């Protein structure tokens, strides 16, 4: 009999690429049988048939980079939040928007209502040859260009006509072209999303294993009208719907329970294990470590140390034995880790962000975001997190997080003049804030729920991973955990029972010996 997850996957089309064939050969479309000079020209041809595609896309946060959290009321999204990687998108648009699904977002004047600005190819290319240029504001390079700068390496322009004639359903690499490289490099931001997931094996992720279930992103992150399910801004900490079946009104599969139910264990110990699911998220046991596909992830980023030069007077760059930069004069000091043990916290899905303009306490560690949840909340579960830590600039008079203008050829760009005052003045001004003229650096932390790189059941956490002192859940409070916690009254009663039993057995034995001697038996 097939395992339950395989049956569900088949029902929802996880194995569809093996069985189905597209009903349209785009190479036969006259609209695509001509040379294209730019990406927007390709989009115009796509929209002749896919008339509603751009309108649909315009409604998504993938396009707007804005998200109004219905739970907290906060205005979030990539263009609004502050992080502790490259800090913010404002004034750094051409570099940041190389991962936007559009063309030409290079400043605040970008027209979010333009249909031809939508980049169809970045999600629908099946050749693997379409790449946006890193500083091209979402465009690929249309002429041969050198990258990285001064490297002598020439990046050739993609063949847009060839790619347009071979478009299809998105695959892992389409999504991964941005999501695997968030934060400025391979695996930098998430830790559980990196280039190892282009072709993952069973040990990297049991669901995406290329030789096994081979899930693509849309298997769980179901789509409709170009809206993609599963948002980190409103993470579903517990899914009470149970298994989702064809015909159910809500077909979103972006939770473990939607396929596995809330009673997923079927082995002899199932009852004991299933008793945990109302308190422990599936990913807590089934993602014992992240960044375990052979790629490291950044765990620390110290902007305060940026701008140093070596003894030779040249900009300093230091790499470890594996080639990871531990110091970059443009960005500061880094700490990288691989096979990282998550940190665990109660989590109910409610995440509050420290937004631009909010007063901070520079004497302590400033949370970029704060996760909510507790043992007493039935909607909370114990979740695993990557916690990114570092130091970043803040306005020392106003006590607010600051935004540096990093990228550009103008005199205010930090990566041109390494002048924090000018960079912070330009960055804050771009977001409508006035810079006081004094800055400092404050330590921050940023919580990222860990949801990918699901291990095999053999590699999942065992009972004694948590039910012991100094185990995985040592710092998770608010409840009594057998094996980890002690209660003096219970301990006294327990030992009393032990000694009482031993005393009883001893007295009984002595009595038997005495009786035998007296009775001759």
Image (tube, rainbow, N blue to C red):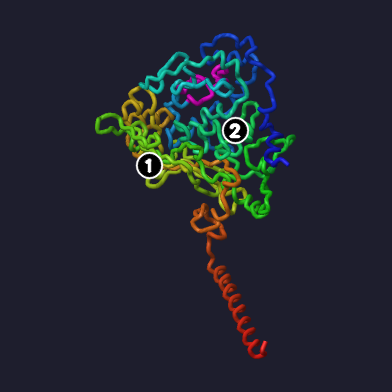
**Residue 351 in the image, given as x and y percentages of width and height:** 53, 42
User: Residue at image x 62%, y 35%?
Assistant: 212
**Looking at the rendering, which quadrant does residue 48 occupy?**
top right
Few, some or many C-alpha atoms within 10 Å of disc 1 (few <14, some 14-19, many ≥20)? many
Q: Which residue is mark 1?
A: 442
- Asked whether residue 348 appears in the rendered view, the answer is no
User: Is residue 243 inside the magenta stretch?
Assistant: no
Residue that extends furthest to the front in the rendered view of this protein: 520
Look at the picture and state if 169 lies above or below 517: above
- Asked whether residue 275 appears in the rendered view, the answer is yes
Q: Which residue is mark 2?
A: 210
Q: In 3D space, how far apart are the residues under numbered discs 2 and 1 (Cα atoms)?
A: 43 Å
Residue that extends furthest to the bottom in the rendered view of this protein: 518
**Residue 478 in the image, given as x and y percentages of width and height:** 54, 56
User: Residue at image x 43%, y 30%?
Assistant: 432
Few, some or many C-alpha atoms within 10 Å of disc 2 (few <14, some 14-19, many ≥20)? some
Q: Quadrant of the C terminus?
A: bottom right
Q: Mainly helix, strand or loop, the magenta region? A: loop
Judged from the image, the secondary structure of the residue bearing numbered disc 2 is: loop
Give the residues drawn in magenta, as a range: 97-120
Say the numbered circle drawn on residue 387.
none
Disc number lying in front (2 or 1): 2
**Looking at the rendering, which quadrant does residue 499 occupy?**
bottom right
Mark 1 or mark 2, which is nearer the start of the sequence? 2
User: Residue at image x 56%, y 34%?
Assistant: 200
């Amino acid at each position: 009999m097939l395992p339950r997850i395989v049956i569900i996957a088949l029902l929802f089309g996880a194995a569809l690429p093996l069985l189905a064939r597209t009903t349209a050969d785009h190479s036969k479309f006259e609209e695509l049988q001509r040379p294209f000079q730019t990406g927007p020209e390709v989009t115009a041809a796509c929209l002749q048939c896919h008339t509603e595609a751009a309108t649909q896309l315009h409604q998504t946060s993938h396009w707007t980079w804005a998200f109004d959290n219905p739970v907290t009321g906060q205005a979030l999204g990539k263009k609004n939040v502050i992080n502790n990687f490259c800090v913010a998108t404002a004034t750094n648009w051409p570099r940041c928007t190389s991962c936007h699904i559009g063309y030409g977002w290079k400043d605040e004047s970008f027209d979010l209502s333009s249909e031809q600005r939508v980049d169809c190819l970045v999600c629908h290319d099946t050749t693997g040859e379409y790449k946006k240029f890193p500083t091209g504001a979402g465009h690929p390079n249309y002429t041969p260009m050198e990258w990285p700068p001064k490297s002598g390496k020439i990046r050739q322009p993609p063949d847009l006509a060839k790619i347009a004639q071979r478009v299809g359903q998105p695959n892992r690499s389409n999504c991964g072209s941005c999501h695997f490289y968030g934060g400025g490099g391979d695996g930098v931001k998430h830790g559980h999303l990196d280039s190892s997931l282009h072709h993952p094996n069973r040990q990297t992720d049991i669901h995406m294993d290329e030789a096994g279930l081979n899930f693509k992103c849309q298997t769980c992150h179901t789509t409709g009208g170009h809206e993609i399910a599963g948002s980190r801004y409103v993470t579903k900490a517990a899914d009470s719907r149970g298994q989702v079946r064809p015909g159910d009104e809500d077909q979103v599969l972006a939770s473990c329970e939607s396929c596995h139910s809330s009673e997923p264990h079927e082995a002899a110990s199932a009852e004991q294990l299933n008793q945990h699911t109302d308190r422990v998220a599936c990913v807590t046991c089934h993602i014992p470590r992240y960044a375990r596909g052979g790629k490291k992830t950044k765990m620390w980023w110290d902007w305060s140390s940026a701008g140093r030069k070596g003894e030779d007077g040249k900009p300093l760059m230091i790499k470890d034995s594996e080639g990871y930069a531990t110091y970059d004069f443009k960005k500061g000091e880094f700490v990288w880790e691989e096979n990282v043990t998550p940190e665990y916290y109660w989590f109910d899905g409610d995440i509050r962000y420290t937004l631009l303009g909010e007063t901070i306490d520079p004497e302590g560690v400033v949370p970029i975001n704060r996760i909510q949840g507790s043992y007493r909340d039935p909607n909370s579960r114990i979740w695993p997190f990557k916690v990114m830590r570092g130091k970043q600039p803040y306005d020392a008079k106003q006590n607010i997080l600051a935004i540096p203008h990093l990228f550009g050829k103008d005199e205010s760009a930090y990566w041109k003049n390494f002048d924090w005052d000018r960079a912070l003045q330009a960055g804050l001004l771009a977001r409508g804030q006035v810079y006081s003229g004094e800055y400092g650096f404050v330590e921050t932390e940023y919580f990222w729920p860990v949801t990918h790189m699901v291990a095999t059941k053999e590699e999942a956490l065992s009972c004694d991973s948590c039910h012991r002192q100094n185990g995985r859940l040592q710092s998770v409070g608010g409840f009594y955990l057998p094996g980890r916690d002690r209660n003096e009254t219970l301990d006294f009663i327990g030992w009393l029972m032990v000694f009482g039993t031993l005393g009883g057995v001893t007295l009984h034995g002595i009595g038997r010996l005495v009786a035998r001697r007296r009775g001759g038996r």
